[in-house]
Amino acid sequence: MSDFFSKLQPIIDSAQSLQQNHLTVYIHCSKLNSLIQTIKLIPNLIENEKKNSIPTSEKKSPKRSINFKNRNSISNIQNAIEQVQSMANECLKETCVQYLLNNPIKTARKEIQSFRETLHNNFELLKFNNIAARFKISKDELADQDLVDMKRISQILTQLSLKGRTD
């Protein structure tokens, strides 16, 4: 069992790297910050799962092993976290205007939704249902986050037009 948890270190490292960057996302901030906050919980949640997996006389722990499917899930989770970090870097105050001009707004929403689905599905494959559930949000909640983000984008575009920028 400990071998299984040791193989999760790349996920923990990616989540901790995101946590250490202290990103202040400027656009798509409601959707991205919600996702980033959930990712930051991963190391502690995995540690809790590890503690709870230690068999006692009252309970048996689920059998977990590292097979091809699990290795693939670990890699998918790590890649998704790195892609979230990359997107967040593009949505910082210094780079957000370029990101806005080069990427359709709908694309960002779909990407963030895809990150959530990837993380949810792959944590489920690893039998971390508690962690997986945290990445699942309703369409209404996503729409609410999108509405907040659209207001922010509107403010940024208004500020740009008042400055007379030509980007």
Image (cartoon, rainbow, N blue to C red):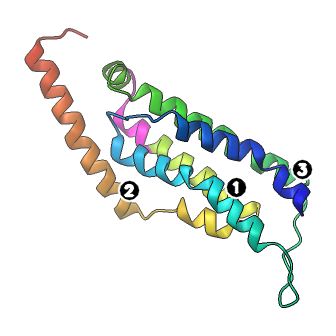
Tell me which amino acid carries mark 2: Leu
Based on the picture, tell me whether residue 165 belongs to the magenta stretch.
no
The amino acid beneath tag 3 is Phe
Earlier residue among tags 3 and 2 = 3
Q: Which of 104 and 84 is in front in this view?
A: 84
- Left or right: where does residue 95 sit relative to residue 19? left
Q: Quadrant of residue 120?
A: bottom right
Q: Distance between the residues labelled 3 and 2?
A: 33 Å
Residue under the point 54% across and 47% down? 114
Q: Where is residue 133 in the image (x, y as percent from the top left)?
A: 57, 67
Q: Which element type, helix, strand or loop, lies under badge 3?
A: helix
Q: Distance between the residues labelled 2 and 1?
A: 20 Å
Which residue type carries mark 1?
Answer: Asn
Q: Is residue 49 visible?
A: yes
Q: Is residue 111 left or right of residue 122?
A: left
Q: Position of residue 26 (x, y in %)?
A: 32, 33
Crowd tier of the residue under label 3, counting other residues whose Cα lies within 10 Å: few below 14, some 14–19, many 20 or above: few
Q: In this view, does 14 lie above or below 45?
A: above
- Crowding at dot 2, Cα within 10 Å, few <14 / some 14-19 / many 20+, comes out as some
The circle on residue 68 is: 3
Front residue of 24/78: it is 24
Q: Which mark is residue 142?
A: 2
Residue 96 locus on image (x, y percent): 34, 24
- Label 1 crowding class (10 Å Cα cut-off): few <14, some 14-19, many 20+? many
Residue 84 is left or right of residue 46, and the answer is left
Looking at the image, tell me whether mark 3 or mark 1 is earlier in sequence order.
Answer: 3
133 is higher (above) or lower (below) than 115: below
Secondary structure at numbered mark 1: helix
> Measuring 25% from the left and 48% from the top, which residue is drawn there?
148
Where is 120 relative to 29, above or below?
below
Which region of the structure is painted magenta? 102-109
The quadrant of the rendering that contains the N terminus is bottom right
